Image (cartoon, rainbow, N blue to C red):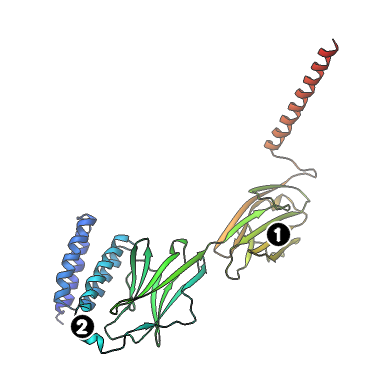
Amino acid sequence: MVPSEAHCEKILLTQWWDIEREVLTKSVMKGLLVIILSVYLHAFSAKELAHDVKEVLLQSHNQDPNVDELLNLLYMDTTTHKYLSYPGDRTTAPPPYFVKGDHSPNSTVQLGAEVTLHCKVNDLAEHTTVSWMKRHGDKLKLVSVGLEAYSSDPRYSVNFRTPNDWQLKLEGAQRSDEGHYECQVSSHPPLVQPYYLTVVVPEINIADERGHPIKNKYYNSGSTIELQCSVNKIPEAQTIFWKLGSKVLNFDSSRGGISVKVDETDSGALSRLFIANSNPHDSGNYTCALGDIAQSSVTVVVLNGKDGEAPAAMHIGASSKTMVSSLALFGVIVTVLDLTS
């Protein structure tokens, strides 16, 4: 079977990209690529070639900002030409419009959650497209056109749900995903629906039984270990786990004497861990984790002996205090002797 001319051009374009991207600088590459694409776009179907070039670019450089910029240029070149053609046809059909539904343009999600933004458009003409953009300061980054993702970030996908819902999906929301998004309709004049995404990053802090923040804690053998974990900024229900090393303590019944109590607070939750009759085997790294989203850790040391065997640093501190007290007392005695002599 003889390959089509368009298929041959796609193969040549792929081979050219693989060779030239290793030789030319990024600025020269972008300029030459835009020129070559413009020539091809006038010779072949713009929509089909745009899809082919997009696949080549995304396979070559995953999540490269320069590729995203080239995709933006490619999108503009393949779409703006149709805005200038057949001006009389645009007046025969009713203009498209956004439908105000039950989905708010402002969304708040937790770190790591899946995001779905909804853009409902009625009376969409045959040659009119719906695009998603993300704003970075004064610049707009193209995310999708129709059902095609034009971003090098693989977490983005587009879905259409009848009769009019164009959905932008984002997996595993990160702090950097927070910001302004736009749903654009290529009508005349263009329609723009703004959105704002807030990504909530939980705050986790571990404290002792008195509520004082700690990074390490010493206990005497036989005493009760009590740690408090405050978790703030929880937009959705999540389970708080306590772990010793990699072992989850919430459901540990083998040791005995372990209990976890969780109370709701105005800003989140407070989880308290109790370990009765502690011994040196209870020493280690204790972690308070909010699922797989966020965590905080402290080091607990259970001292040997009934009265506890303090670390060397603690002994040095006590000796230093005794020495200072002795010198102070000696100074007082010398002063009194001088006054009485």
Viewer-proximal residue among 126 and 113? 126
Q: Work out whether residue 5 or residue 47 is closer to the camera in this orientation and state it.
A: 47
Mark positioned earlier in the residue sequence (1 or 2): 2
Q: Which mark is residue 225?
A: none
Q: Amino acid at mark 2?
A: Pro
Question: In terms of image quadrants, where is residue 143?
Answer: bottom left
Circle 1 is placed at which residue position?
Answer: 273
How far separated are the C-alphas under marks 1 and 2? 71 Å
Which residue is at a point 79% across and 43% down the rendered structure image? Answer: 307
As drawn, the residue found furthest toward the bottom would be 92
The vertical placement of 204 against 12, above or below, is: above
**Image height check: is 21 above or below 167?**
above
**Residue 172 seen in render:** no
Residue 98 as seen in the image, left or right of residue 320 = left
What residue do we see at 77% from left, 20% from top?
A: 331
Residue ID at (22%, 87%)? 89
Say what secondary structure mark 1 lies in. strand
Which residue of the protein is positioned furthest toward the top in this rendering?
Answer: 341
The x and y percentages for residue 18 are 22, 62
* Percent of width and height locating residue 310: 72, 40
Residue 332, quarter of picture: top right
Q: Amino acid at mark 1?
A: Leu
Quarter location, residue 75:
bottom left
Residue at numbered disc 2: 87
